[in-house]
Amino acid sequence: MANIKIKHGSEGPKWDPYGFTEIEFTKTDGTVVTYHGGLAEWCKVEYKDGKKYLIDNLEESSILFKLETGLTPDEAEEWYYKMEASKEKQCQECGSRKLEWKSGYPGEELLICSKCGEVANCHFDESAVI
Protein backbone atom coordinates (compact mmCIF):
# COMPACT_ATOMS: atom_id res chain seq x y z
CA MET A 1 0.00 0.00 0.00
CA ALA A 2 1.27 3.48 -0.84
CA ASN A 3 1.93 5.95 1.96
CA ILE A 4 1.88 9.76 1.95
CA LYS A 5 3.42 12.12 4.50
CA ILE A 6 3.03 15.91 4.33
CA LYS A 7 5.14 18.52 6.07
CA HIS A 8 4.46 22.27 6.15
CA GLY A 9 6.93 24.87 7.31
CA SER A 10 8.80 28.01 6.38
CA GLU A 11 12.14 28.54 4.67
CA GLY A 12 14.31 31.45 3.69
CA PRO A 13 15.58 34.30 5.83
CA LYS A 14 13.83 35.12 9.12
CA TRP A 15 12.99 38.63 7.92
CA ASP A 16 11.34 37.31 4.71
CA PRO A 17 10.16 33.70 5.25
CA TYR A 18 8.38 31.61 2.62
CA GLY A 19 5.95 28.82 3.36
CA PHE A 20 6.55 25.37 1.90
CA THR A 21 4.77 22.07 1.54
CA GLU A 22 6.73 18.85 1.21
CA ILE A 23 4.95 15.70 0.05
CA GLU A 24 6.66 12.34 0.53
CA PHE A 25 4.98 9.52 -1.39
CA THR A 26 6.24 5.99 -0.72
CA LYS A 27 5.18 3.57 -3.42
CA THR A 28 4.42 -0.12 -2.86
CA ASP A 29 7.73 -1.10 -4.50
CA GLY A 30 9.70 0.97 -1.94
CA THR A 31 10.38 3.94 -4.24
CA VAL A 32 10.16 7.25 -2.36
CA VAL A 33 9.05 10.34 -4.32
CA THR A 34 9.45 13.69 -2.55
CA TYR A 35 7.98 16.94 -3.91
CA HIS A 36 8.98 20.25 -2.32
CA GLY A 37 6.92 23.34 -3.18
CA GLY A 38 7.96 26.65 -1.67
CA LEU A 39 10.82 29.06 -2.21
CA ALA A 40 12.45 26.27 -4.20
CA GLU A 41 10.48 23.77 -6.28
CA TRP A 42 11.98 20.31 -6.69
CA CYS A 43 11.16 16.63 -6.92
CA LYS A 44 13.44 13.80 -5.82
CA VAL A 45 12.94 10.12 -6.60
CA GLU A 46 14.82 7.50 -4.57
CA TYR A 47 14.51 4.03 -6.02
CA LYS A 48 14.76 0.91 -3.87
CA ASP A 49 18.05 -0.06 -5.54
CA GLY A 50 19.66 3.18 -4.27
CA LYS A 51 19.48 5.22 -7.48
CA LYS A 52 18.32 8.82 -7.06
CA TYR A 53 16.92 11.36 -9.49
CA LEU A 54 16.36 15.07 -8.77
CA ILE A 55 14.69 17.84 -10.79
CA ASP A 56 14.69 21.40 -9.47
CA ASN A 57 12.40 23.11 -11.98
CA LEU A 58 8.81 24.09 -11.14
CA GLU A 59 7.02 22.59 -14.15
CA GLU A 60 9.28 19.58 -14.58
CA SER A 61 9.20 18.67 -10.88
CA SER A 62 5.38 18.53 -10.94
CA ILE A 63 5.50 16.40 -14.08
CA LEU A 64 8.05 14.00 -12.54
CA PHE A 65 5.92 13.66 -9.41
CA LYS A 66 2.86 12.81 -11.52
CA LEU A 67 4.78 10.34 -13.69
CA GLU A 68 6.09 8.50 -10.63
CA THR A 69 2.95 8.57 -8.45
CA GLY A 70 0.04 8.99 -10.87
CA LEU A 71 -1.07 12.10 -8.95
CA THR A 72 -0.24 15.78 -9.20
CA PRO A 73 1.16 17.31 -5.99
CA ASP A 74 -2.22 19.00 -5.37
CA GLU A 75 -4.11 15.73 -5.88
CA ALA A 76 -1.71 13.92 -3.53
CA GLU A 77 -2.25 16.54 -0.84
CA GLU A 78 -6.03 16.34 -1.28
CA TRP A 79 -5.89 12.53 -1.12
CA TYR A 80 -3.83 12.74 2.08
CA TYR A 81 -6.38 14.95 3.84
CA LYS A 82 -9.27 12.76 2.68
CA MET A 83 -7.48 9.75 4.14
CA GLU A 84 -6.91 11.63 7.39
CA ALA A 85 -10.60 12.57 7.44
CA SER A 86 -11.61 8.94 7.00
CA LYS A 87 -9.86 8.18 10.29
CA GLU A 88 -12.55 10.24 11.96
CA LYS A 89 -15.35 7.67 12.09
CA GLN A 90 -18.10 9.82 13.58
CA CYS A 91 -18.95 13.06 15.33
CA GLN A 92 -18.21 12.92 19.06
CA GLU A 93 -21.23 15.14 19.84
CA CYS A 94 -24.09 13.53 17.92
CA GLY A 95 -22.64 10.29 16.51
CA SER A 96 -23.28 11.23 12.87
CA ARG A 97 -20.93 9.72 10.28
CA LYS A 98 -21.47 12.56 7.80
CA LEU A 99 -18.30 14.64 8.15
CA GLU A 100 -16.93 16.94 5.46
CA TRP A 101 -13.97 19.29 5.06
CA LYS A 102 -14.80 23.01 4.76
CA SER A 103 -12.55 26.04 4.30
CA GLY A 104 -12.43 28.50 7.16
CA TYR A 105 -10.10 31.48 7.43
CA PRO A 106 -7.16 31.54 4.97
CA GLY A 107 -5.09 28.40 5.49
CA GLU A 108 -7.68 26.80 7.76
CA GLU A 109 -9.53 23.58 6.88
CA LEU A 110 -12.22 22.27 9.24
CA LEU A 111 -13.80 18.80 9.38
CA ILE A 112 -17.42 19.60 10.25
CA CYS A 113 -20.33 17.37 11.15
CA SER A 114 -23.11 17.87 8.59
CA LYS A 115 -25.79 17.13 11.19
CA CYS A 116 -24.87 19.27 14.23
CA GLY A 117 -22.09 21.54 12.89
CA GLU A 118 -19.50 20.42 15.47
CA VAL A 119 -15.83 20.68 14.42
CA ALA A 120 -14.42 17.14 14.49
CA ASN A 121 -10.91 18.00 13.30
CA CYS A 122 -8.95 20.86 11.76
CA HIS A 123 -5.83 21.56 9.74
CA PHE A 124 -3.94 24.83 9.43
CA ASP A 125 -1.60 25.55 6.50
CA GLU A 126 0.71 28.29 7.75
CA SER A 127 2.19 28.76 4.27
CA ALA A 128 -1.20 30.04 3.02
CA VAL A 129 -0.95 33.14 5.22
CA ILE A 130 2.79 33.83 5.33
Image (tube, grey):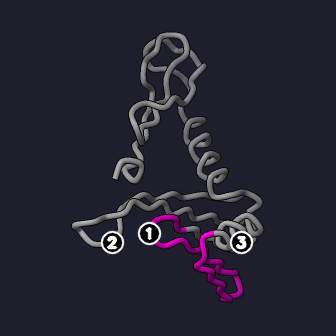
Relative vertical location of residue 94 with respect to residue 5 in this rendering, above or below: above
The residue located at (59%, 70%) in the rendering is: 34
Question: What element does badge 1 sit on?
Answer: loop
Image height of 104 relative to 123, above or below? above
Residues drawn in magenta: 36-58
**115 on left or right of 71:** left
- Give me the residue at 36% from left, 47% from top: 129
Pointer 1 or 3: first along the chain: 1
The residue that disc 2 covers is 12
Horizontal side of 85 relative to 47 (left or right) equals left
Q: Position of residue 119 (x, y in %)?
A: 42, 24
Q: CA distance from mark 2 to mark 3?
A: 25 Å
- Tell me the quarter of the image containing the N terminus: bottom right
Earlier in the chain: of badge 2 and badge 3, it is: 2
Residue 83: quadrant of the picture = top right
Name the residue tied to disc 1: 39
